Image: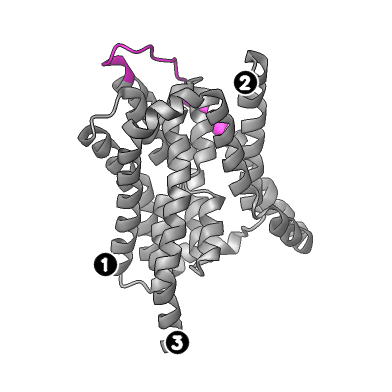
């Protein structure tokens, strides 16, 4: 692919795809949904804190334990900073989990990470790259917050407004857009693989064990958290999926569009495949528990 083609996809297609994903999320949200925070504060709060603090800590530690290269470790860390996405909501729906819980956790993490991602990245990028003698891109945290707000928060608000004034149309549009997140993830990953095919192959053996370790640790932590809170099977699976299935489209947007680094996106491409595969296996494994629990209630 030519440099002009790569630039067009990186700076036009990827941001547009991300905005469409966030818009589709907004179509499923109302202000009443946020009342779940008051109704089930322990469950929502625990899931939110896990996503915001535990997952990045796990990614940081796994990068050290597996002695990843600076680019691989930073790429994995950026994935952990991103919110859950509509893919996690769709997989929760397929797995018969608590979709309302999934949506509110996704929405809360999407809103808060507009501010946390720029602040953490302004520390993380120099920490990971400068010590290894890599070129460190200049970051403007305030400008990045504004950029993320336009790309993520604005489409969510537009979707919510459309849902408020045209609920039937919004519901039909949401059903039509439901598979959009998965399709966009596949397209973005495919683009990165085509552009950096050799780089992806070189990273398969070196990065995949750490990526699997992070994803499996996130799945396990979500299930254990649900058990510790006394949650039912549906809620426990939802917490697990929300912790382990990230908005990879946003992660790739950050690395390709904001940081302008294709090597950083390679780890995220692999994580995108791993998270969908493992979430599908979790759904098949956990389905029996949900069905048995439903029969006893």
Residue, disc 1: 228
* Mark 1 and mark 2: Cα distance apart in space: 47 Å
| Type of colouring | one colour
Residue, disc 3: 295
Against 202, residue 31 (above or below) is below
Residues rendered magenta in the picture: 129-148
Residue 79, disc: none
Q: Is mark 1 on a helix, strand or loop?
A: helix
The reply to whether the magenta stretch includes residue 138 is yes
Against 11, residue 56 (above or below) is below
**Residue 35 visible in the snapshot:** no
Residue most extreme to the left:
65
* Camera-side mark, 1 or 2: 2
Residue 6, disc: 2
Q: Is mark 2 on a helix, strand or loop?
A: helix
* Mark 3 and mark 1: Cα distance apart in space: 23 Å
Q: Which residue is drawn at 30% across and 47% down?
A: 54
Q: Position of residue 138 (x, y in %)?
A: 44, 15
């Amino acid at each position: 692919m030519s440099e002009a083609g790569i630039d067009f996809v990186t700076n036009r297609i990827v941001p547009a795809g991300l905005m469409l994903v966030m818009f589709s999320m907004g179509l499923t949200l109302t202000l009443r949904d946020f009342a779940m925070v008051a109704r089930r504060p322990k469950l929502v709060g625990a899931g939110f804190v896990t996503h915001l603090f535990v997952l990045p800590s796990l990614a940081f530690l796994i990068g050290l334990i597996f002695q990843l290269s600076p680019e691989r470790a930073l790429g994995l860390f950026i994935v952990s900073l991103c919110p859950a996405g509509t893919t996690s909501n769709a997989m929760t729906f397929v797995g018969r989990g608590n979709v309302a819980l999934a949506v509110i956790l996704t929405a809360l993490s999407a809103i808060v990470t507009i501010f946390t991602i720029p602040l953490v990245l302004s520390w993380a990028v120099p920490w990971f790259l400068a010590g290894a003698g890599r070129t460190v891109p200049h970051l403007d945290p305030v400008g990045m917050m504004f950029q993320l707000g336009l790309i993520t928060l604005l489409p969510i608000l537009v979707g919510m407004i459309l849902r408020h004034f045209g609920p039937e149309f919004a519901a039909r549009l949401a059903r039509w857009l439901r598979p959009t997140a998965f399709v966009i993830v596949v397209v973005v990953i495919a683009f990165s693989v085509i552009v950096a095919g050799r780089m992806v192959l070189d990273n398969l053996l070196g990065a995949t064990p750490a990526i699997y370790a992070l994803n499996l640790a996130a799945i396990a932590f979500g299930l254990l958290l649900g058990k510790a809170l006394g949650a039912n099977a549906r809620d426990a699976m939802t917490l697990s999926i929300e912790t382990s299935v990230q908005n990879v489209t946003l992660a790739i947007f950050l690395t390709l569009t904001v940081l302008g680094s294709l090597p950083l996106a390679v780890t995220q491409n692999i994580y995108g495949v791993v998270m969908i595969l493992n979430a599908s296996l979790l759904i098949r494994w956990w389905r029996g528990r949900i069905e048995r629990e439903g029969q006893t209630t």
